[in-house]
Amino acid sequence: MITAKTPWKDYLGEVPMHLDYFEGSMFEAVQAIAKKHPKNIAFDFMGKSTGYPELVAQIETCAKALKTLGIREGDKVTVAMPNCPQAIYMFYAINRVGAIANMIHPLSAEKEIEFYLNDSESVAAITLDQFYGKFAAIRENTGIRNLIITSIADALSPVMKVGYALTQGRKIAPIPKDAPVIMWKDFLSLSFCGHNYAVKRTGNDPAVILYSGGTTGTSKGIVLTNLNFNALGQQVIAANQMFRPGDKMLAAMPIFHGFGLGVCIHTMLSQGGRCILVPRFTPKTYAKDLVKHRCNFIAGVPTLYEALLRLQDMDGADLSCLKGVFSGGDSLSVELKKKLDKFLYDHKAVIQVREGYGTTETVTACCLTPSHMFKEGSIGLPFPDTYIKIVEPGTDKEVPYGQEGEILLAGPTVMQEYMHHPEETAETLRLHKDGLTWVYTGDLGIMDDQGFVYFKGRAKRMIITSGYNVYPAQLENILDAHEFVQMSCVIGIPDPYKIQKVKAIVKLAAGVEESEATKQAILDHCRKHIAKYAMPYDIAFRDDMPKTLVGKVAYRVLEEEELAKLKAEQE
């Protein structure tokens, strides 16, 4: 059997092959560490620090308020927030009352938000005041009973609050006084429910919904359990023996993303770490926070690191504080790794970037390069108690070492299901004769005879732009719905910063003129339905589309044509 079960012990000596996982809820994991390290800071946000005792107290307050609102065990509550204290409190408060947190991108288009609310069957939601308009526009089409509105200002010190009101706050339209919402202060005042608000949950109970494309590229809610997140936290720390309680993580990856939520937030807060919350990422603010807070760990996508290398602000910066730099979300090119490693060395860091791999179906990372054993092109070794094997695509037949096949994953972080999609769940999660349930990732890779895994590409059609997964089929459905469009094809174009950027190829309906006005009309339509990060940067018109032998649009032909054009322009 050519299966890699974590050989971390062989490489790190003290890391056990098996970990004893915390069996309670995510909140209970944080509560336990708060009792163990009561003097530790849990997170910093825009100049204000919050200790673990206060974190737990605020979570309890929010949990009581949720109970007063009628949130019950198993209810879904949507969190559409950036990385800020209220998002942290609500995430764990939802868990505390036995409900399920549906984490979505606050910059999602209105129709996307409507879909997420309805698909998850959410009964309540929380978002920032600046996103109120989106929720107001679609709320009557959903089952939302309570909409909680907060502001960045609600989490600031008095001095910072004044500054915010005079700058960013002035740009946000005020919430109508008669709006059927619950403002943050009013929400907290509902915490008079003093008993019977906490619900005991086990590791196997569902706790979180994250949206991803699944194996068919259509958006599906991935149901993850308490154990999935708690196990991830313990695995990440086991694979990073330099971590100590109190160490700082720059939490810039978003909380609605498995990487940001699982690694940057829950791993740190369940293990006694300190999160530096970054609500709005820009390369400049990222660099500033990294240096100012003397962060010990940073995690990001390759585009983030590419931007970091270009910043003049980092000239002379001392990064000797770093204990770990992790890259995930997309392949880290060999050349970018070399540049980043040199950058770290030039700025007094004694570590190199470590590449990882994972899927939202396993929360996020499940494989990582060891700290002192790098193999060029490898995404490393599976975490403790995680298994990886390479099979002939779609089968359970393993291939020999060094031969390409489909990457399969098994372990304690494997999702419970695709919500409302039993057929695709059955297709993705398969029980093998070895007694393990394997995730069929749709990704291609190879494994060497030491258990190191090499990612080779994606079998399923997907574009990754700035670390976000974009599924062309979804965008094509939106484009094709416009009256000007007869047929469309969405492709990814190489980009030095974003890795890929989204481009739409359109065959216009009969009688529609190719013009800038036509293009803008289609783009305006897209903006109503497509999140900003997934928007096509351009639309190209064609008289006809290349087809495959079975009559499908040959998107690979279009990709090759665009690559040829790009190459010709560069020459």
Image: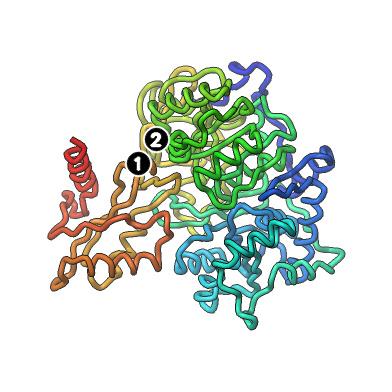
Q: Farthest bottom residue?
A: 178
Q: Amino acid at mark 1?
A: Ala
Residue at the spot of label 1: 459
Structural distance between the alpha carbons of marks 1 and 2 = 8 Å
Between 344 and 119, the residue placed more toward the observer is: 344
Q: Residue at x 43, y 60 (%)?
A: 531
Would residue 7 be seen by someone viewing this image from the given angle? Answer: no
Choose between 34 and 557: the one closer to the eye.
34
Mark linked to residue 565: none
Q: Is residue 71 above or below residue 209?
A: below
**Mark 1 in CB contact with mark 2 (< 8 angstroms):** yes
User: Which residue does the numbered mark 2 point to in the structure image?
Assistant: 406
Quadrant location of residue 10?
top right
Residue 446 against residue 487 in the figure, above or below: above
Residue depicted at x 60% and y 41%: 289
- Type of amino acid at the residue the image marks with label 2: Glu
Packing grade of label 2 (10 A; few <14, some 14-19, many >=20) is many
Residue 561 is left or right of residue 162, and the answer is: left
Q: Residue at x 52, y 65 (%)?
A: 119
Q: Can residue 130 be seen by looking at this rendering?
A: yes
Task: First in sequence, mark 1 or 2: give its number.
Answer: 2
Q: Quadrant of the C terminus?
A: top left
Q: Residue 382's image quarter?
A: top right
Q: Position of residue 465 (x, y in %)?
A: 40, 46
- Name above or below for residue 111 compared with residue 345: below
Q: Secondary structure at mark 1?
A: loop
Q: Secondary structure at mark 2?
A: strand
Q: How is the image coloured?
A: rainbow
Marks counted in the figure total 2
User: Residue at the spot x=51%, y=64% of the render?
Assistant: 116
